[in-house]
């Protein structure tokens, strides 16, 4: 950043002052872009947790026998999260048996 400031002020000996200012501007833009990128969590942008999941009894589901699920049992309460459904979100926030959980893969 200091180099860009020096270049902008024209303190470096360069034959073309406009070329120096363009270089300083590009350096400043890169510094700003990297500073912004350092504060962005790309995984948070890519994977949004599912909203409140809804459940059906096992007898009412339309899952076949080969369906992959993430199964959780807490205090006698069981839940199954089909991988096919949570594959976009990769994260499910839920409460099972009064305990908040995060199911992910």
Image: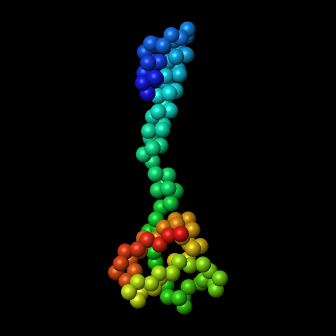
Query: What residue is drawn where x is 53% and y is 77%?
Result: 70
Residue 78 occupies which quadrant of the picture? bottom left
**Seen in the image, is 32 located left or right of residue 83?**
left
Which quadrant does the N terminus fall into? top left
Provide residue 2's location: percent of width, then percent of height.
42, 24
Q: Which residue lies most toward the left here?
A: 98
* Depth order, front residue of 105/22: 105
Residue 75 occupies which quadrant of the picture? bottom left
Image height check: is 34 above or below 77?
Answer: above
* Depth order, front residue of 95/105: 105
Q: Which residue lies most toward the bottom here?
A: 59
Query: What residue is drawn where x is 57% and y is 74%?
Result: 83
Query: What residue is drawn where x is 46% and y is 51%?
Result: 41
- Please indicate, yes or no, whether residue 18 appears anywhere in the rendered image: yes
Query: What residue is drawn where x is 47% and y is 72%?
Result: 103
Q: How is the image coloured?
A: rainbow
Provide residue 80's location: percent of width, then percent of height.
51, 81
Provide residue 33's location: percent of width, then percent of height.
48, 37
Image height check: is 76 above or below 40?
Answer: below
How many labels, in total? 0
Provide residue 43's location: percent of width, then percent of height.
50, 56
- Please indicate, yes or no, whether residue 55 appears anywhere in the rendered image: no
**Seen in the image, is 30 located left or right of residue 101?**
right
């Amino acid at each position: 950043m200091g180099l860009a400031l020096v270049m902008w002020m024209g303190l470096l000996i360069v034959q073309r002052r406009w070329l120096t200012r363009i270089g300083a501007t590009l350096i400043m833009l890169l510094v700003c872009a990297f500073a912004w990128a350092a504060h962005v969590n790309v995984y948070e942008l890519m994977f949004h947790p599912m909203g409140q999941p809804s459940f059906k009894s096992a007898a009412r589901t339309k899952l076949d026998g080969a369906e992959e699920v993430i199964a959780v049992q807490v205090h006698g309460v069981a839940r199954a999260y089909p991988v096919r459904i949570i594959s976009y979100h990769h994260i499910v926030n839920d409460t099972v048996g009064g305990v908040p959980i995060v199911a992910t893969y």
